[in-house]
Image (spheres, rainbow, N blue to C red):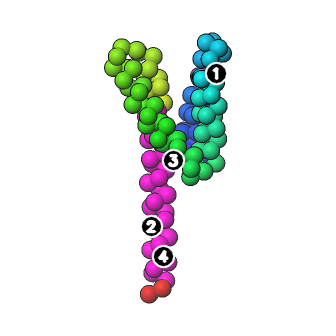
Amino acid sequence: MKRLRVASSLLFLSGFLLLYYAYYLASPVYLTFAIFNMGLGYGVGIENKTAIKVALIYAGVTFFFSLLFLIAGNPLALVEVAMSFFIIHDILSYIKVVVQEEEAEEELETGTEN
C-alpha cells in the first residue's frame, strides 16, 4: 500500500481548485499557489522529506485561516478546512509509522551488538 496517498491526492485537488480560481479571476497569485500545491502533491507522493515538512506546515496554516473564514461566516471554507485536516492527519500518521519503523530498526541493531 502506498503511503500518503490521501495527502497527495488532496494537495492535487486543492491545486486544481486553485487553478479554477486563477482562470475565473485571472489572478496570477492563485496560479502561483495552484502550482505550489501541485508541486507539494508530487513531492509528498514520492515521499520527499522536505516536501512533507513544507506540506505539513502549509496545511496547518491553511487550516487555521480557513477555520477563521468558516467562523466568520463563509460556509464554503468548510471544504478547505476538511481538506487541510485530512492532509494534516495523513502526514502525521505517516510520521508516526516512520518513527516506529526507525525505532524498531534501532532496537534490532542494538540487540545484535549485545
How far across and down, in percent of the image, does residue 51 sit? 57, 46
Residue found at the far front of this picture: 28
Query: Is 18 displayed left or right of 111 in the figure?
Result: right
Which of 98/49 is in front?
49
Asked which secondary structure carries label 1, the reply is helix
Name the amino acid, label 4: Leu
- The residue singled out by tag 4 in the image is 108
Q: Can residue 3 be seen in this view?
A: no
Question: In the image, what residue occupies the spot 49% across and 58% down?
Answer: 98
Mark with earlier residue (2, 3): 3
Distance between mark 4 and mark 3 Cα atoms: 28 Å
Magenta-tinted stretch: 84-112
Residue 97 in the magenta stretch? The answer is yes
Query: Is 114 displayed left or right of 25 in the figure?
Result: left
Q: Nearer the viewer, mark 4 or mark 3?
A: 3
- The residue singled out by tag 3 in the image is 53
Q: How crowded is mark 4: few (under 14 residues within 10 Å), some or many (20 or more)?
A: few
Mark with earlier residue (4, 3): 3
Name the amino acid, label 1: Pro
